[in-house]
Amino acid sequence: MSEKDVNTGFSAEERAAMKDRATELKAEARRAKGAEKAAAEEADVQAKIAQMPDGDREMAERVHAIVSTVAPDLAPKLYYSQPGYARDGKVVCFFRSGQMDKERYSTFGFSVHADLDTDDGLWPTAYALQDPSEQAWERLGEVVRHATRAAAGG
């Protein structure tokens, strides 16, 4: 893990991600609405995935395919300079490249806009990804389906 800056409390990677996010928000504000915006955001996500190191790139491509298939109403968009998937402009789930973040594993996570609530009040909000099996990919699809069902009317 990277050393934290004494003055800000954030690592260089965290500061860069925040700067990237501010740039993303400014770009979103300048973009046109509708199909043009959706196409541009899809292209941004695909470009970011293409830049990822081997291993993480393949996982991000698989995540992208799963989310696009299981929750086609979610729109791809960059989220802290990594692939995210949003409904009504609010990110529901996202992928974080472990190699780009200088961490030992990549992460697939959910925001507060995901429907993860359980009867017992305890649910995971992120999953570590490190060479997932086919069974793990199937489970990820089920979790995405569950997390996106309520707002989609399911």
Image (cartoon, rainbow, N blue to C red):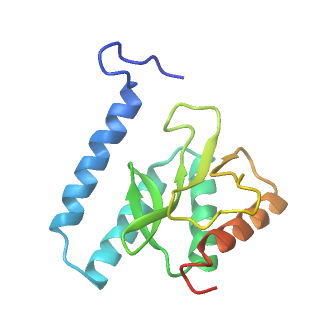
Give percent across and percent down for residue 37: 28, 76
Judged left or right of residue 146, residue 95 is left
Tally of numbered discs: 0
Which residue is pictured at 63% across the width and 68% down the height? 147
Closer to the camera in the image, 103 or 88: 88
Query: 67 above or below 49?
Result: below
Q: Quadrant of the C terminus?
A: bottom right
Give percent across and percent down for residue 59: 63, 55
Judged left or right of residue 75, residue 135 is right
Give percent across and percent down for residue 130: 71, 44
Query: 61 above or below 57?
Result: below
Closer to the camera in the image, 24 or 114: 114
Judged left or right of residue 111, residue 89 is left
Query: 9 above or below 128?
Result: above
Name the quadrant containing residue 28: bottom left
Which residue is pictured at 27% across the width and 55% down the height? 24
